[in-house]
Image (spheres, rainbow, N blue to C red):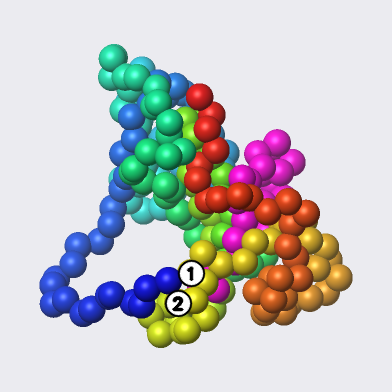
Amino acid sequence: MSGNKATGRPINPPKLHHTTFTTMQLDNMVAWYELAVGLIPAFHNDEAAWLTNDEANHRIAFLSPPGLKKPADKGHETGIHHTAFEYATFDEWLDNYIRLRNHGILPFLTLDHGITMSIYYQDPDGNGVEIQVDAFGDWAQSKQWISSALEFASNPIGTYFDPEKLVAAREAGLTFKEIHENARAGEYVPDTIPADIFLPELY
């Protein structure tokens, strides 16, 4: 793994506001994102939708023009691998995993990246959706850690975990800090580890 190529660049940066997807199943996508991450349509018709789950007018948009084609090999094509949403606390994050599991929505990838504990899902079109919690509970600390920790440089992908083992650990009384440390140590590794981090093919 190569070293950190990031350097400071003086700029007055804009904030990331939204992401827009094209889709051939607009209504299914709107319903899924509302269930998964609480994105509510600000506007939704037969051709497009703009969704938000905070003070912004929209965070995700879907366009459904005629003439769209299915991807030939989505999992191995270049482009966005996933969008990400973050919970403020470990309990909210893990409770959301349980809620989605009870709705039959299961992840295809679960990783402790060191900076975050992350659960990855696929929307109806096969796009990746990460739902995470900051491992430090503080962006300043996690930003410092990702840029300087040899532990991250040597393993930026992270350690796989079984979310059901996290549920059991919390029920046994372990704290978030203890669970995170145990996950990094490989104590919650799933029975089957994915062969790679590619998006599974849905088409």
Characterize the local packing of mark 1: few (<14), some (14-19) or many (20 or more) Cα atoms within 10 angstroms. Answer: some
Q: Nearer the viewer, residue 174 or 120?
A: 120
Image quadrant in which the N terminus is located: bottom left
Query: Which labelled disc corresponds to residue 1?
Result: none
Label 2 and label 1: CA atoms lie apart by 6 Å
Q: Going by the picture, which residue comes out furthest to the right?
A: 172
Examine the image and state in which quarter residue 161 appears: bottom right
In the image, residue 58 lies in the stretch drawn in magenta = no
Q: Nearer the viewer, residue 157 or 41?
A: 157
Q: Nearer the viewer, residue 91 or 10?
A: 10
Q: Does the rendering let one see residue 167?
A: no
Left or right of 28 in this view: 99: right
Left or right of 55 in this view: 125: right
Q: Secondary structure at mark 2?
A: helix
The residue at the point 36 percent across, 77 percent down is: 3
Tell me the amino acid under the disc marked 1: Pro
The residue at the point 31 percent across, 39 percent down is: 20
Left or right of 57 in this view: 148: right
Image x and y of residue 134, in percent: 53, 70
Q: Secondary structure at mark 1?
A: loop
Q: Does the rendering let one see residue 20?
A: yes
Image x and y of residue 184, in percent: 65, 74
Query: Which labelled disc corresponds to residue 156?
Result: 1
The residue at the point 27 percent across, 75 percent down is: 6
Image x and y of residue 78, in percent: 34, 43
- Residue 181, compared with residue 116, is above or below; it is below
In the image, residue 95 lies in the stretch drawn in magenta = yes
Image x and y of residue 74, in percent: 43, 34
- Residue 14, compared with residue 102, is above or below; it is below
Location of mark 2 (residue):
153
Span colored in magenta: 93-115
